[in-house]
Amino acid sequence: MKDKPIGIFDSGVGGLTVLREVEKLLPFEDIVYFGDTARVPYGSKSKSTIIKFSRESAGFLKRKRVKMIVAACNTSSALALEDLKKSFNIPVLGVIEAGVIRAVAVTRKKRIAVIGTKSTIKSNSYQKLIAKKNKSIKVYSKSCPLFVPLVEEGVLNGRIVKEAMKMYLRSLNDKDIDVIILGCTHYPLLKHQISSYLKGVVVIDSAKEVAGYARSILKSKNLLSPKSRKPKVEFYLSDEPKEFVRLAKLFLGRKIPNPKI
Ligand code: DGL
């Protein structure tokens, strides 16, 4: 079991922010990545559709005999994680809990903001989990639907990004928050801009947090792969790979081997 791959799925290319962090923290692990590029975006879809798509994406990974499934997609994590945990008999991790644990540990003012897709924000998953950890924390949430297409267009700074920051984040300025959780796969690519718009606010990158979480679970279950091996990373998609390959370069800073359909 130890030398089986870690499975990571996302609605598309965004989950590569999670893959990047998993590669950094767990450099000897094989990874199978599945991007549901034929059906992206998940972030504006209904709960039942998100559960159905997430189950199918995770099922694909299970058939690849992975030892753990990471739902890199925040929208899947927000709406389908409970269902996935029940459906599969291997560890299934979402990106929400890891980010929440860090945010709750870091906030002094007990005022946290969460940004994500429309479906993630509407689900209230972050609020519920934060309240479970500490009832006295106030949570402000905001969906930022334009951030995903901006990132996918490679528009990471400049006038349009500044305007988008203003449009979505202005309302958080007078809430006296000291922590913001990036509750979407794509937002780590805008981290700099978000940081400089919300000066002095700690920015929590869920992708980074979930990599640490995955490591601790593998360790506790004695499932870490043997060290000093050259890992194999495979990419599978549900649609043609051209756009994915282009964006992968932006997300990972390197060329990836040809994804399979
Ligand atoms: N991966 C999605 C998320 O993290 C963003 C893209 C989409 O809407 O599918 O919520």
Image: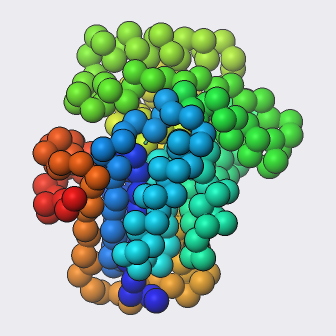
Residue 112 as seen in the image, left or right of residue 20? right
Quadrant in which ligand 1 is drawn: top left
Q: Whole-percent x and y of residue 65?
A: 41, 79
Q: Whole-percent x and y of residue 237?
A: 27, 55
- Identify the residue at horizontal 33%, vertical 62% (top origin): 33
The reply to whether residue 60 is in sight is yes
**Which color scheme is applied?**
rainbow
Residue 136, relative to residue 215: is it above or below?
above
Residue 160 as seen in the image, left or right of residue 121? left
- Identify the residue at horizontal 30%, vertical 12% (top origin): 160
Quadrant holding the C terminus: bottom left
Q: Nearer the viewer, residue 154 or 197?
A: 154
Q: How many marks?
A: 0
Please tell me in which quadrant of the rendered image residue 83 appears: bottom right
Residue 59, relative to residue 38: is it above or below?
below
Please tell me in which quadrant of the rendered image residue 89 appears: bottom right
Residue 194, relative to residue 96: is it above or below?
above
The reply to whether residue 196 is in sight is no
Q: Whole-percent x and y of residue 199?
A: 51, 23
- Identify the residue at horizontal 32%, vertical 26% (top origin): 149
Please tell me in which quadrant of the rendered image residue 236 appears: bottom left
Q: Whole-percent x and y of residue 216?
A: 57, 72
